[in-house]
Image: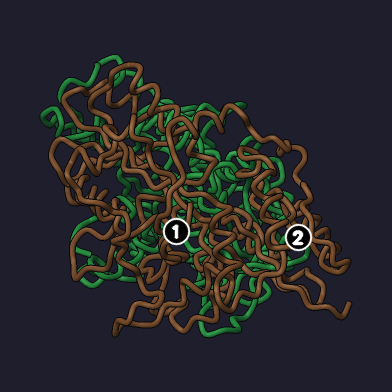
Chain colours: A brown, B green
Amino acid sequence: MNEAWTVMEVCGGQTQAILRWGLDQLLPDGMELVHGPGCPVCVTPAACIDQALQLALQEPVILCSYGDMLRVPGSPRPQGCGDLLQARAGGGDVRLITSPWQALELARQQPERQVVLLAVGFETTAPATALVVLQACRLGVANLTLLQAHVRVVPAMEAVLAAAGNRVQGFLAAGHVAAVMGSAELEQLVRRWRIPVVISGFEPQELLAALELCQQLLSAGTPRLINAYGRVVRPAGNGEAQVLMRRVFAPADGPWRGLGAIRSGVLRLRPAYRHLDAVGRFGLGDSGNGEAQTGSGAPDPGPPCHAAAVLQGRCRPSDCPSFGSACTPQNPLGAPMVSSEGACAAYYRYRR
Amino acid sequence: MSRVLLGHGGGGSLMQELIAGEFAALYSDRALLADDAARLELPQGPLAFSSDGYVVQPLEFAGGDIGRLAVVGTANDLAMVGARPLHLSVSLILEEGLPLALLRRLVASMAAAARQCGLTIVTGDTKVVERGKADGVFITTSGIGVCQSPGAIGPAAMAPGDQLLLSGDLGRHGLAILAARHGLELDPPVATDCAPLWPQVEALLQAGITLHALRDLTRGGLGSALLELAAVSGCDLWLDEQALSLAPGVESCCRLLGLDPLHLANEGRFVLALPADQAVAAAAILAPGGGRWIGEVRAGTGAAVQVRLRTCLGSQRLLAPFSGELLPRIC
């Protein structure tokens, strides 16, 4: 094979599986994989983490979030609470949850406390958050609020393609997001950008099969969408989940850590549910565009960080001069090193 | 770092840093601190001594409880230096308000575990602290045993060419605790693997097997034990991932939650390094408990020692480092 193709897997779970199974060692010559921005923990704005840290240390607050959010550092600061695990050690009431329902339950059990759910994730987790919002309203639970940073995947794929210096010629799309959203958004992306997209699962053999399909589409010059995760993804997606999400959230322009503002890239609570927004309830000020960027282009004197280029597939984590030295999972400089699903963290785990 | 984090007790790199940075320099013998138990060369013969604190929540979980863990865990630490466990002290810190029925269950469980381990509980202490000052029950056990191995067992004896054996499947204790703690309803349920290790170690010693290194896989799992062995021996370790066995439910649950089964805790498993010509005989002794060959020791090649895995696809990867805190991922 003489053609050289660059394909991006979008989802952090896929990046993790590719490195975990060493799939990139098995690719034919000329096929290059670059890793996308699909790690919701990584792309949660530092300002949002800062707000969570601030709330976690307030007396009546119980701050609930998912496991890997607890070790994501906020904005760089000279000393003090860098992540929620440290906030917990410093006296904050931080609870690890595995379902947003646990936050609702906690709020009902402890009406004298203020329960804040730090809710992040793509279209995979947003419907569950929406359901909790609706249930909280139905039950009149007054002491539950959301600090939320739900984001949308397809607008980020568009941002990658639109960025100067883009090298991505084909996508492996995130299977779980497609299971919720169906194929319509991806069909539009294919038409608009004339780029092949293959919806892929997460098992090693599924990823390899999806890569082969993508290579065939590239070689034939026939950009189209293929669903290679048919055992899970239906063309219409999960209608009920979409209805829930649309009822509670509306797409908006907003920041992704490491990538900056993305058009239609985030979900915001609709006005009817704004009273559940922790930012308003606790007078935190808008996290909106005030993202304190860690590394990635900010003209600071510290060690360099190529997070933005990594998230856009323009460079490999190991190409960054700070990788594994100034930047490690314990002391991350940029977004993709902060979560176990980030591309830099995956390289650090399996390729140091 | 200005405060102690939960991760500092998790058996990973954070704990190693804490011990190396804060404790080791102030204690008497650095060499003795490095192993699961100390081998004391007394005039009457070598004696093993070990101590361990137990703070697990919940106090009772699938297949075990904190009492059983406190007895079996310290007995296993003694077995890891080739010692037959003999006597144990039990120190209890109880929280005011603890139901007496629960305490009775835990004590009965400790007595049963002691019988199973062939040791006796000979001394102890009981303190009660105010409600909120402890989490139900904390238990500290210290144990002594008589060393039955001809010489000290320690990773310094490991050499390129040595083979690595693992005594059973991985991850059941860690997952059982995680499930109980976070209310995960696993189907099929996963129970702890908590079990005495001395019978297997004794069988190996009686067969004349030379043990270059022994480690029980507690906090931090097989992964942390191997990283430690590699660091102390200065050798690279190569594992065949296909040789690692996981109980039904453990593998699928790890994939779902984004956990690495190599870093899940175990309470009834150990890894050993031994000369290649004895590997077949040793594997046969361990086979009834699910033990098998998993990899080999090679000369270190890079600037830092490595633990590498060969995947079932023929590719390779490094063993992921482990800080000490197991956190289920979001999606």
Camera-side residue of A79 and A139: A139
Q: Amino acid at mark 1?
A: Cys
Is residue B147 positioned above or below B301 on the image? above
The numbered mark at residue A263 is none
Residue A141 in the image: above or below residue A97: above
Q: Circle 2 is placed at which residue position?
A: A196
Residue at 30% x, 35% y: name it. Answer: A274
Whether residue B85 is visible to the viewer of this picture, yes or no, is no
Label 2 crowd (10 A; few <14 / some 14-19 / many >=20): many
Q: Which mark is residue A42?
A: 1
Q: Residue at x 30, y 81 (%)?
A: A300
Query: Which chain is mark 1 on?
Result: A
SS assignment at label 1? helix
Name the residue rendered at 49%, 27% in the picture: B62
Task: State how many labels appear.
Answer: 2
Residue A269 position in % (x across, y down): 37, 38
Tell me: A263 left or right of B7.
right
Quarter of the image where the C terminus of chain A is located: bottom right
Q: Is residue A58 or residue A127 the one in the foreground?
A: A127
* Residue A18 picture location, percent across and down: 66, 61
Q: Residue at x 83, y 58 (%)?
A: A213
Q: Position of residue B36 (x, y in %)?
A: 41, 56
